[in-house]
Image (cartoon, rainbow, N blue to C red):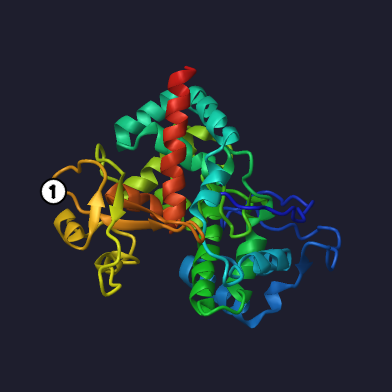
């Protein structure tokens, strides 16, 4: 999803020629003395951290990296306190509000920008629709929600942010799991840089390490991104066409069904005489469409429009603070979007923005 980005220190020293052994530019050994800290980040000499030393051992043994090259790289990697703070959970007690969330993304800047982006990339979007079966407006809306079509791609150094979170994630119930995830992404960052022949310190992105117009994590770049402009490389930072193809590729590989609808409005029955709500059993049942419409109807869920036959659904509840929530029936394609960001709010904002962009384009072709 679109994130609030903070300016982070950008190391001025550019690295020397690519090392023949490892494929990415090694940190300059003749760089001028680094500052010990800035107001935004601090050089913590990660190479001296025991857990980082263990990680270097793993990269040497598993992937054949040069120990001295990695040690020098981690000496030039900064600790980002801002990333740690942004990863902390929101304060408890504040109710979720779908209408407020939606207003952040379904708004004139993203709608008008989406029309322009579509016009500028009409050929690539049509090709993506044909090849992957993902509608152009969904691809455009995801890129609009993520970065406003490349306007807000983030300016944290990816090595700094991911290394910080991999070894000093904030103290939360999921800390160990999240640290393991970010260590995997750090591994992918180094592999991606080597495979692409780029300096890992040159990568910039979000405070979580997401890169480029579609905000792919390094692991997702390696697994799902495609060279859609045919220039022999995947470049999500500078190629709008690669971003378009990669978003479509990601969705298809996460369960997108070409030609099928996405979501349908629904209502739910009021409490029975005992205050029970049978449809509650279908709330928070994972990010997949797995219930038949007959099961949902029996629990008091009523579609507001006719539904296709032989499809499965999930019950989507969009909380509106202290107001009345909205209910929808999400099909497989809705839940494919949630794999991009595991949030009903996110997926529904993509759907609503895509509709707004398509309507605006039809009115002002």
Q: Left of 58 or right of it: where is 3?
A: right
For residue 201, above or below residue 119: below
Give the percent coordinates (x, y) of residue 355. 41, 34
Can residue 79 be seen here? no
- Seen at 68% across and 74% down, the residue is 47
Give the percent coordinates (x, y) of residue 171. 60, 79
Q: Residue furthest front?
A: 273
Give the percent coordinates (x, y) of residue 26. 67, 57
Query: Mark 1 Cα within 10 Å, few/some/many (few <14, many 20+)?
Result: few
Q: Nearer the viewer, residue 359 or 178?
A: 359
Q: Nearer the viewer, residue 279 or 143?
A: 279
- Seen at 30% across and 67% down, the residue is 280
Q: Left of 50 or right of it: where is 174?
A: left
Q: Residue furthest top?
A: 365
Can residue 277 be seen here? yes
Count the marks: how many?
1
Give the percent coordinates (x, y) of residue 186. 55, 64
Q: Nearer the viewer, residue 194 or 150?
A: 150
- Seen at 27% across and 69% down, the residue is 281
For residue 84, above or below residue 127: below
Q: Left of 349 or right of it: where is 190?
A: right
For residue 63, above or below residue 304: below
Residue at image mark 1 = 310
For residue 39, above or below residue 121: below
Looking at the rendered structure, the secondary structure element under dot 1 is: loop
- Seen at 56% across and 35% down, the residue is 110
């Amino acid at each position: 999803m679109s994130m609030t980005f903070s300016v982070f220190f950008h190391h001025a020293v550019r690295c020397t020629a690519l090392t023949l052994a490892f494929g990415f530019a090694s940190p300059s050994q003749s760089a001028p003395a680094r500052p010990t800290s800035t107001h935004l980040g601090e050089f913590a000499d990660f190479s001296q951290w025991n857990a980082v030393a263990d990680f270097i051992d793993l990269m040497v043994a598993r992937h054949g990296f040069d120990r001295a090259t990695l040690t020098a790289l981690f000496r030039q990697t900064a600790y980002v306190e801002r990333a740690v703070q942004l990863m902390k959970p929101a304060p408890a007690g504040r109710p979720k509000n779908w209408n407020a969330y939606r207003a952040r993304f379904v708004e004139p800047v993203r709608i008008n920008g989406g029309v322009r982006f579509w016009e500028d990339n009409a050929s690539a979007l049509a090709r993506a629709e044909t090849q992957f079966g993902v509608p152009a407006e969904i691809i455009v809306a995801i890129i609009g929600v993520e970065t406003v079509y490349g306007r807000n791609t983030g300016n944290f150094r990816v090595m700094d942010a991911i290394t910080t979170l991999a070894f000093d994630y904030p103290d939360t119930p999921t800390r160990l799991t999240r640290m393991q995830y970010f260590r995997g992404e750090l591994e992918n960052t180094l592999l991606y840089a080597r495979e692409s022949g780029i300096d890992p310190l040159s990568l910039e992105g979000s405070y979580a390490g997401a890169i480029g117009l579609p905000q792919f994590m390094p692991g997702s770049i390696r697994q799902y991104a495609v060279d859609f402009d045919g220039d022999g490389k995947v470049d999500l930072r500078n190629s709008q066409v690669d971003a378009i193809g990669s978003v479509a590729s990601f969705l298809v590989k996460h369960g997108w069904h070409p030609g099928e609808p996405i979501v349908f409005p629904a209502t739910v029955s009021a409490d029975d005489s005992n205050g029970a709500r049978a449809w509650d059993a279908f709330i928070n049942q994972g990010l997949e469409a797995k219930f038949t419409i007959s099961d949902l109807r029996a629990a008091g869920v009523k579609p507001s429009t006719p539904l296709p036959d032989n499809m499965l659904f999930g019950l989507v509840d969009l909380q509106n603070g202290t107001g009345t929530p909205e209910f929808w029936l999400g099909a497989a394609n809705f839940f494919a979007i949630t794999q991009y960001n595991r949030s009903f709010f996110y997926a529904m904002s993509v759907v609503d923005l895509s509709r707004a962009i398509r309507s605006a384009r039809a009115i002002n072709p």
